[in-house]
Amino acid sequence: MNTEMNSILGTSMLKEPVDCARADWTSNLLDTQGFESAKIDVIIGAITGVDGSNYLTLTLEECDTTVGTSFTTVATTEVKGAFTVINASTKDSCIQSVGYLGVKRYVRVKGTYTGSGISAGIIGVVSQVGDARVKPPTSPVPVAST
């Protein structure tokens, strides 16, 4: 292999791993400007109290601006792979990854809890961009919604 990964990929932390017990959240924004591909990884620790009535749903959202209320769910045709609902203890303690195929400038992950039985759960979000228009790539700085 003659190319090291750091020379072709940029990595950013969109959400530091923290306990998100029952509080819906959104990650910071991934700015895809200057890149042709993006991958988003959600790192999920053990979630206390998760079951069929108490679960976490992950959604990939996109927008051309940083206005938080303007984000919409990415169409399934614009996502490679899919997030799965965390609704059992056998589905946590994992990394869920999707590729973004869309054309909007900003992408984020939204976590939504259903039920009130979840009392703890560490969640983090990391992104990678590739196919930079200018090489070597510079990792994009996560952007906060406005």
Image (tube, rainbow, N blue to C red):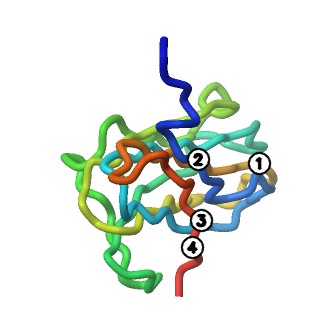
CA gap, disc 2 and disc 1: 20 Å
Picture residue at 29% right of the left edge, 45% below the top: 79
How much space separates mark 4 and mark 3, taking CA atoms?
6 Å
Residue 87 image point, x, y percent: 56, 40
Which of the marked residues, 3 or 1, is nearer the chain's N terminus? 1
Q: CA distance from mark 3 to mark 2?
A: 9 Å
Identified at 74% across, 44% down, the residue is: 49
Choose the circle earlier in sequence order: 4 or 2: 2
136 sits left or right of 131 in the view: right
Name the residue at 48% across, 16% down.
Answer: 2
Q: Disc 1 marks which amino acid?
A: Ile
Label pair 4/1, CB-CB below 8 angstroms: no
Q: CA distance from mark 4 to mark 1?
A: 21 Å
Q: Amino acid at mark 3?
A: Val
Rendering quarter of residue 33:
bottom left
Contact? badges 4 and 2 (CB < 8 Å): no
Counting residues from the N terminus, which is met first, the one under dot 4 or under dot 1? Answer: 1
Q: Amino acid at mark 4?
A: Val
Secondary structure under badge 3?
Answer: loop
Q: Earlier in the sequence, mark 3 or mark 2?
A: 2
Which residue was labeled with disc 1?
122
Residue holding disc 3: 141
Residue 83 in the image, given as x and y percentages of width and height: 44, 41
Residue on which the image places disc 4: 143
